[in-house]
Image: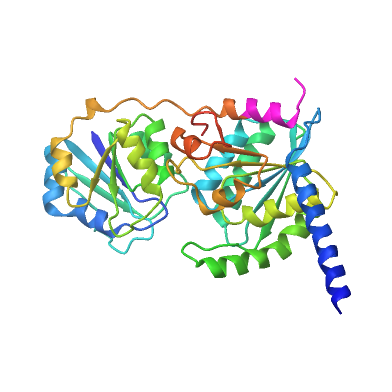
Amino acid sequence: MKCLFVTVGTTSFDDLIACVSAQDTLQIIKSLGYSRLVLQIGRGTVVPEPFSTESFTLDVYNYKDSLKEDLQKADLVVSHAGAGSCLETLEKGKPLVVVINEKLMNNHQLELAKQLHKEGHLFYCTCSTLPGLLQSMDLSTLKCFPPGQPEKFSAFLDKVVGLQK
Amino acid sequence: MEGVLILAALGGGTVAVFIALRFWIVLHHRVVPRESLSLLVVAGSGGHTTEILRLLGNLSNAYSPRHYIFADTDEMSAHKIRAFEVDRAERYSSTMYTTHRIPRSREVRQSWLSTVLTTFYSMLHSFPLTFRLKPDLVLCNGPGTCVPICLSALLLGILGIKKVIIVYVESVCRVETLSLSGKILYYLSDYFIVQWPTLKEKYPKSVYLGRIV
């Protein structure tokens, strides 16, 4: 059972939620073989009606203490450009599409998403280009994401504060 | 009358030179070998806290006690820090931490002038707290709250009360530009760490260790 997880973090991103829950997009998602769509909508005011049929389930919620489980179950993640969501998804090795909120210009969070896109770790689009991208993208072209190296930080810090080994 | 003015100018000049000298000495302090050190962590909202806890997760138990400061409205950080420390207590038996709340220094999209005023207001809370805790090290990664705390820590050094090492880690979100806190603390921190090479090129004094979160 293939699952698509959409997450907007602690913000709201009504345009994205409206876009993925529109009939046309739902058809595309179904045609790609997904049978479950989970929407984490944060503070959003667009709240699609959850439903469950034999072939397809739509789940909707605002927040959970941890998105870990939903990320783990997902075969594809569609996320806002928040750094936390991007990094957490990539670390789990899940394919990621970042959707930019054009209503938030000069949002510094975009810097990270753009850079990670440049390095080939994720796909990058706006609400209007999302349906097209879902159909055309090839997930196998994404590069694997190496983990960060906090041990380099601790080694550096131990040295500069004078901790004896 | 003129004499008074000259005296005042001389006095003012001496104080300025003294402060500048202290400032220089504080920022060029030699490393003292030690067994352990107390750490003051300035946690910010959401992503900032997650990032700084990842860095802390890799530090040895020599960094103890850990004092956490976060904005008084920030329940999410309080929750994350508690979870982090509960988990840590399972691994290290004699681990210590405290938490402290201060007024938020800057709300998102607040104007520059009112930022200066709220930062000043925030100093009134930050300085007594920093003075009381007298940490060996301040670690922060960019929430507005960290500027008054770092200023207070620096002031402890300038007044000769305690040399506090200030380490600033710019958030991994910052690829090409520094945050407002980063732009200020670039000049005031002992070590300024960036996580992308573009920033290292723009800010040569910074330290680049790769992506560390």
Q: Nearer the viewer, residue B169 or B94?
A: B169
Number of callouts in the render?
0
Which x, y percent locates residue B110? 50, 66
Query: Is A129 on the left-hand or right-hand side of B22?
Result: left
Q: Position of residue A42 (x, y in %)?
A: 38, 56
Picture quadrant of residue B173: top left
The residue under the point 51% across, 43% down is B171
- Is residue B183 something that shows in the picture? yes
Magenta residue span: A154-165
Q: Position of residue A148 (x, y in %)?
A: 48, 29
Q: Main secondary structure of the magenta part?
A: helix
Could you say which quadrant of the image residue B28 lies in?
Answer: top right
Residue drawn at (17%, 40%), measured in percent from left and top?
A134
Give whichever of B81, B1 is nearer the camera. B1
Q: Is residue B13 left or right of residue B53?
A: right
Residue for point 22% across, 52% down = A127
Name the residue: 75% across, 44% down.
B24
